[in-house]
Amino acid sequence: MTRTATINRTTRETAISLTLTLDGSGQASISTGIGMYDHFLESFARHGQFDLTITCEGDLHIDEHHSVEDVAICLGQAIAQALGDKAGVTRTAHAYVPMDEALAFVAIDLSGRPYHVLQCQWSTPQIGGLTCDLVEHVFETLAVHAHMTLHARVEYGRNDHHKAEALFKALARALDTATRRDPRLGDSVPSTKGSLVG
């Protein structure tokens, strides 16, 4: 059975429709109104082999914060919904991804316990139309709404675009592995408690 989730969210600040297929082929159709965010989310879909469709109409006349945050909320919710009770999944994974001079590391646990750590030093306040501090906010929001523990860091790098893109790619690679079914588990949940539902 294909693990797919669709999330629709409308507030006074944003209107979002998002569909995620975990067992996809890396196809992406993304329109948030923020070109750099679209780019990073497309990289996430491609490198995680997720199919991802996002449309977001947001209050960009104010700034990009609400759109970025609300898309991350929807993506986190979609991950949690598509995983269901997490029976048979690998659960934990990590990935290193280099991008030119930058190297990023991400480790995740689909634990049902939201926690987030990101270590990165930015050289500039903004990448394209995306404020650098929102990259960390995306990772934190994903951890909360996907009910996962997420640790990430940029080991080194000079270019902020490369640092951020390496982080999104490493997240994708780690999440792809963690969400894969382990045939040895069958329909059991990989936890001594018997549940990973947040």
Image (cartoon, grey):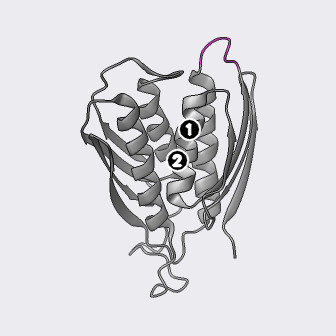
* Residue 90: % across, % down: 44, 72
State the residue position of label 2. Answer: 43
* Residue 78: % across, % down: 64, 52
Q: Amino acid at mark 2?
A: Ser
Taking the magenta stretch, the answer to whether it contains residue 155 is no
Pointer 1 local density, CA inside 10 Å: few below 14, some 14–19, many at least 20: some
Is residue 119 rendered to the left or right of residue 64? left
Indicate which disc residue 60 carries: none
For image coordinates 75% across by 22% down, the residue present is: 12
Q: Quadrant of the N terminus?
A: bottom right
Asked whether 114 or 94 is in front, the reply is: 94
For image coordinates 50% across by 39% down, the residue present is: 141
Q: With respect to residue 176, does 96 lie above or below?
A: above
* 3D distance between C-alphas at marks 2 and 1: 6 Å
Decide: marks 2, 1 in contact (CB < 8 A)? yes
Name which quarter of the figure residue 111 lies in: bottom left
Name which quarter of the figure residue 129 lies in: top right
Element marked by disc 2: helix
Residue most extreme to the front: 100
Indicate which disc residue 39 carries: 1
Asked whether 36 or 121 is in front, the reply is: 36
Whether residue 123 appears in this view of the structure is yes
Q: Main secondary structure of the magenta part?
A: loop
* Residue 191: % across, % down: 41, 73
Is residue 23 rendered to the left or right of residue 194? right
Element marked by disc 1: helix
For image coordinates 43% across by 67% down, the residue present is: 91
Residue most extreme to the left: 156
Q: Amino acid at mark 1?
A: His
Instruction: Specify start and end residues of the magenta stretch as a single range.
Output: 59-63
Whether residue 198 appears in this view of the structure is no
